[in-house]
Amino acid sequence: MEPLYVIKIGGNIIDDEAQLSSFLTAFAGIEGKKILVHGGGKLATKLAAQLGVEQQMIEGRRVTDVDTLRIVTMVYAGYINKNIVAHLQANQCNAIGLCGADGNILQSHKRQHATIDYGFVGDVDKVNTPVLQSLLAQQVTVVMAPITHNMEGQLLNTNADTIAQEIAQAMSALYQVHLIYSFEKAGVLLNADDDSTVIPAITQASYAQLKQQNIIFAGMIPKLDNAFAALNRGVHRVVIGKAEQLQQLIQQQSGTSIIHE
Ligand SMILES: Nc1ncnc2c1ncn2[C@@H]1O[C@H](COP(=O)(O)OP(=O)(O)O)[C@@H](O)[C@H]1O
Ligand SMILES: CC(=O)N[C@@H](CCC(=O)OP(=O)(O)O)C(=O)O
């Protein structure tokens, strides 16, 4: 099977112009088919504060009211997505920037939860793999913003780690998918503040233990839940590591590998 790289870039890198630019140069240089999924939570939080719209995160998910939905749509599907595409074009990588409503790529439904009202947050139901496949076949790199839709005209905010997982999983029927979660740290760390403490490999059992010891917490929990979901649903390889070391992550020389028992 032909390899496909599904790479997710986190909000802290996106928020740093120099780091984003060098990441995108490295990304543009990857040979073969690739999809970039971006977040942008940090910038959305900043803009919401400037506009006086209060924000609440529950288990790594943003509670999304009407005003917040407007902000995240403008920030993710507008500014960040188009800025990334322009940088990739400058690096001779022909890219197209889309959200889940474009080409009906990501259909979702409003999250239902027994006790928490997340507002306009979507859980993915369907990935339109033929549209993605046809863009890739034309040597176009797809850049996905974390906004989905419900087929009834409603946009929904969806966690970017989950979008990367859903796309990776769906595309595994067609390609040998390598899912790479890249962010500002060197991987899953024994001490979250010390890049020299990378855990080279994590199994479901060691994850449970590390979580219980509070070595893994906050945003790393949904990231790892998504990573294991991907691995268990046909994705060839899942790795978490530093955006600056993209090339080494691809060559399996860096970061934390998510592995079966
Ligand atoms: N053991 C750990 N190793 C690395 N980071 C961790 C760990 N436990 C918690 N974290 C936190 O998880 C964060 C990454 O999650 P998140 O902010 O959602 O990622 P992203 O930038 O990709 O959106 C890190 O910035 C760090 O603060
Ligand atoms: C529902 C939900 O939580 N959506 C996320 C989407 C952006 C995201 O995931 O950005 P990072 O990858 O930079 O964290 C949010 O609004 O924060």
Image: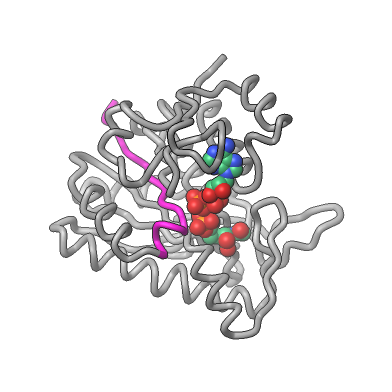
When asked about the image quadrant of residue 214, the answer is: top right
Q: Quadrant for ligand 2?
A: bottom right
User: What residue lies at 72% left-to-right and 56% top-to-bottom?
Assistant: 58
Residue 172 placement (x, y as % from top left) = 41, 32
- Left or right, 106 with respect to 66, comes to left
User: Is residue 159 in view?
Assistant: yes
User: What residue lies at 21% left-to-right and 53% top-to-bottom?
Assistant: 25
Residue 51 placement (x, y as % from top left) = 59, 85
Magenta-tinted stretch: 1-15
Residue 169 or residue 185, whichever sits in front: 185
Residue 79 placement (x, y as % from top left) = 39, 74
Magenta span includes 185: no
Answer above or below: position of 191 versus 52: above
Answer above or below: position of 205 versus 30: above
Looking at this rendering, what residue extends furthest in the left direction? 92
Quadrant containing the C terminus is top right
- Left or right, 66 with respect to 78, comes to right
User: What residue lies at 43% left-to-right and 48% top-to-bottom?
Assistant: 183
Residue 234 placement (x, y as % from top left) = 48, 27
Residue 53 or residue 86, whichever sits in front: 53
Looking at this rendering, what residue extends furthest in the right direction? 115
